[in-house]
Image (cartoon, grey):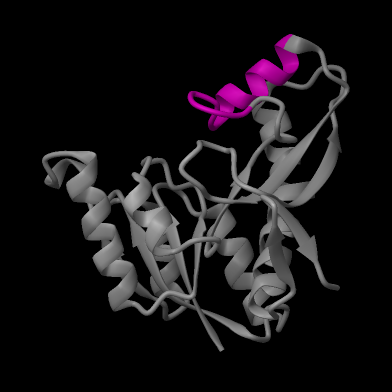
């Protein structure tokens, strides 16, 4: 059984999708054992507590710099014996200490089809605003391994979502969550915990 630690900063809708999938038996070889938040008032902590999951808070401003914060995160993840670390709306950039400590054990969901609309500055509603501004007809979500390059790690899963006339960034964000993010993240966790993902030459191979 793999220990899954989820990193959060906000409302925790992706965390909820993971919890629901676990309760449905869709991640049979993994268990969410801890939720770590970068904000003390994140509603994701309430979601975790309501599901009997241990919580921890590591507030960025409590540390002098990103290196000290990242070191504290590595220590916390090791204490929790994390096998898989999932970024679920975690809005703090960590440095290479964390990636080096947990190579190909950290995954993130991005609300676009990487390599489009990704990288530094592309997060939250900004992604959907840019999608609409550019006029693309299809967007989606990507689950990828976290590496030192922002949104640059090996892609695990992707799912396309239609962009419709009249969409606002908020409407599109919700559709991408419902149709892609909330489905991809539990599936990627399941594949990892089942030992069905390998990385060769910076590309993932899925062994379904």
Would you say 30 lies left or right of 156 here?
left
Return the residue nearer the eye: 47 or 54: 54
Q: Residue at x 49, y 61 (%)?
A: 103
Observer able to see residue 40:
no
Q: How many marks?
A: 0
Would you say 94 lies left or right of 3 here?
left
Q: Position of residue 197 (x, y in %)?
A: 71, 68
Q: Residue at x 24, y 67 (%)?
A: 75
Would you say 27 lies left or right of 139 here?
left
> Where does the C terminus fall, quadrant-wise?
bottom right
The residue most toward the bottom is 1
Q: Position of residue 161 (x, y in %)?
A: 84, 38
Q: Position of residue 104 (x, y in %)?
A: 55, 61
Q: What span is colored magenta in the figure?
A: 118-133
Q: Position of residue 206 (x, y in %)?
A: 80, 65
In which image quadrant can residue 174 be found?
A: top right
Return the residue nearer the eye: 171 or 126: 126
In which image quadrant can residue 128 be found?
A: top right
Q: Residue at x 31, y 50 (%)?
A: 38
Return the residue nearer the eye: 167 or 102: 102
- Residue 51 magenta: no
Q: Residue at x 78, y 62 (%)?
A: 205
> Where does the N terminus fall, quadrant-wise?
bottom right
Observer able to see residue 167:
yes
């Amino acid at each position: 059984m793999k220990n899954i630690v989820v990193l959060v900063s906000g409302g925790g809708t992706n965390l909820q999708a993971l919890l629901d999938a676990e309760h449905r038996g869709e991640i049979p070889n993994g268990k969410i054992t801890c939720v770590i938040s970068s904000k003390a008032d994140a509603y994701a902590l309430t979601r975790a507590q309501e599901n009997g999951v241990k919580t921890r808070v590591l507030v960025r401003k409590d540390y002098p710099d990103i290196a000290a914060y990242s070191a504290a995160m590595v220590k916390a993840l090791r204490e929790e014996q994390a096998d898989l670390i999932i970024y679920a709306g975690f809005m703090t950039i960590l440095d290479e200490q964390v990636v080096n400590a947990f190579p190909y054990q950290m995954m993130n969901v991005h609300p676009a089809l990487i390599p489009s609309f990704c990288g530094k500055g592309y997060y939250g509603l900004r992604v959907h605003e840019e999608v609409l501004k550019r006029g693309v007809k299809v967007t989606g979500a990507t689950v990828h391994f976290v590496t030192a390059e922002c949104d640059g790690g090996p892609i695990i899963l992707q799912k396309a979502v239609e962009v419709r006339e009249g969409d606002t960034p908020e409407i599109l964000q919700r559709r991408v969550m419902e149709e892609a993010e909330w489905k991809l993240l539990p599936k990627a966790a399941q594949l990892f915990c089942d030992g069905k993902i390998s990385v060769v030459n910076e590309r993932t191979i899925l062994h379904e």
